[in-house]
Image (cartoon, rainbow, N blue to C red):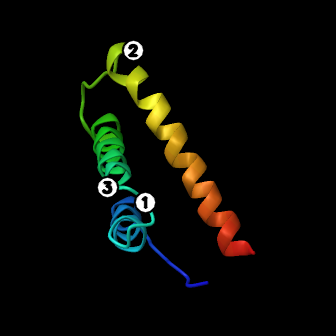
Amino acid sequence: MSKIQTKSHSATKGQFSQHFVKTGKFDKKYGRLLSELFDWRQKGDYENIFDYDNDSVQPLFKPVNEMIKLIEEEINNALQ
């Protein structure tokens, strides 16, 4: 098992892309999803007025849950 170390959220996003999306372990849609979530996090943390409504957030629940399951599977496979 290779170790992936990062010191920032941005670096984590880059490592996810390099080790999981570009290698084909995860579909490109999950790389785009992580980028979108990262951008939203940045806006929520650093922009003065930024609010999310139910209509913009609700469609993300299914793909985020799918991605979490895939990540959990990847972790479990790496631990075996």
Answer few, some or many: residues within 10 Å of disc 2's Cα (few below 14, many 20 plus, some between 14 and 19): few
Where on the picture, by quarter, is residue 49?
Answer: top left
Q: Are marks 3 and 1 in contact (CB under 8 Å)?
A: yes
For disc 2, the marked residue is 54
Counting from the top left corner in percent of width and height, residue 78 is at 65, 74
Counting from the top left corner in percent of width and height, residue 34 is at 37, 49
Q: Label 2's element?
A: helix
Q: Earlier in the sequence, mark 1 or mark 2?
A: 1
Please name the amino acid that badge 3 sits on: Lys
Measured Cα–Cα span from mark 2 to mark 3:
25 Å
Counting from the top left corner in percent of width and height, residue 52 is at 33, 21
Residue sitting at 52 percent across and 42 percent down?
A: 66
For disc 3, the marked residue is 28
Measured Cα–Cα span from mark 3 to mark 1:
6 Å
Residue sitting at 36 percent across and 68 percent down?
A: 11
Please name the amino acid that badge 1 sits on: Phe
Picture disc at residue 26? 1
Residue sitting at 31 percent across and 55 percent down?
A: 28
Q: Quadrant of the C terminus?
A: bottom right
Answer few, some or many: residues within 10 Å of disc 3's Cα (few below 14, many 20 plus, some between 14 and 19): some
